[in-house]
Amino acid sequence: QVQLVESGGGLVQAGGSLRLSCAASGPTVSTLNIGWFRQAPGKSREFVAAVGWSGGHPYYLDSVKGRFTISRDNAKSTVYLQMNNLKPEDTAVYYCAAETTPTNFEYWGQGTQVTVSS
């Protein structure tokens, strides 16, 4: 069983930065790929970024490349999403999720709200 808890969301002006954290627990969490997703009001959930179990092979949604950075610290069982140069269209609830089999993100956190004002 894997448990994920997000934190770090908030209200920020356009151009500002936030760092989201995803605290993970469970016996296998350090072996799992972790992803960040987001869901804006009235829209479907979309993939934002993911990182391999070792911290390698990060990949991103095209619209956040160059602005967001995903990283992980397995010693702290935490995955981070550093978000810079935020835009109003980044406003959403952000979720982290653990990938147990290819493309199957089985475990999800409760989400953290990010609001970017113009």
Image: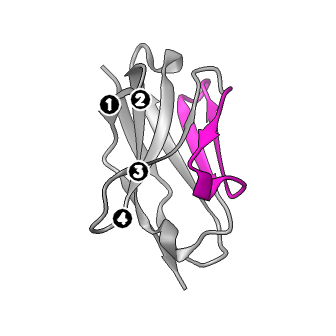
Quick one: label 3 or label 2, which is nearer the N terminus?
3
Residue under circle 1?
A: 107
Residue at 40% over, 64% down: 92
Q: Are marks 3 and 1 in contact (CB under 8 Å)?
A: no
Disc 4 marks which residue?
40
Q: Which residue is mark 2?
A: 98
| Quadrant placement of the C terminus | bottom right
Marks 3/2: CA–CA distance: 15 Å
In the displayed structure, does residue 80 sit left or right of residue 114?
right
Horizontal relation, residue 26 to residue 67: left or right: left
Mark earlier in primary sequence (4, 2) = 4
Q: Picture coordinates of residue 17 (x, y %)?
A: 64, 66
Q: Residues within 10 Å of mark 2 (few under 14, many from 20)?
A: many
Toward the bottom, the furthest residue is 118
Q: Quadrant of residue 107?
A: top left
Q: Amino acid at mark 4?
A: Ala
Residue 50: give x, y in percent of width and height: 55, 36
**What whole-number distance in Å separates the C-alpha atoms at marks 2 and 1?**
5 Å
Kindly report which numbered mark, 4 or 1, lies closer to the viewer in this rendering: 4
Check if residue 112 falls in the magenta segment. Answer: no
Q: Decide: few, some or many residues near mark 4? Use Cα within 10 Å; few <14, some 14-19, many ≥20.
A: some
Q: Which of the two discs, 3 and 1, sits closer to the camera?
A: 3
Q: Please state the extent of the stretch shown in magenta in the rendering.
A: 56-82
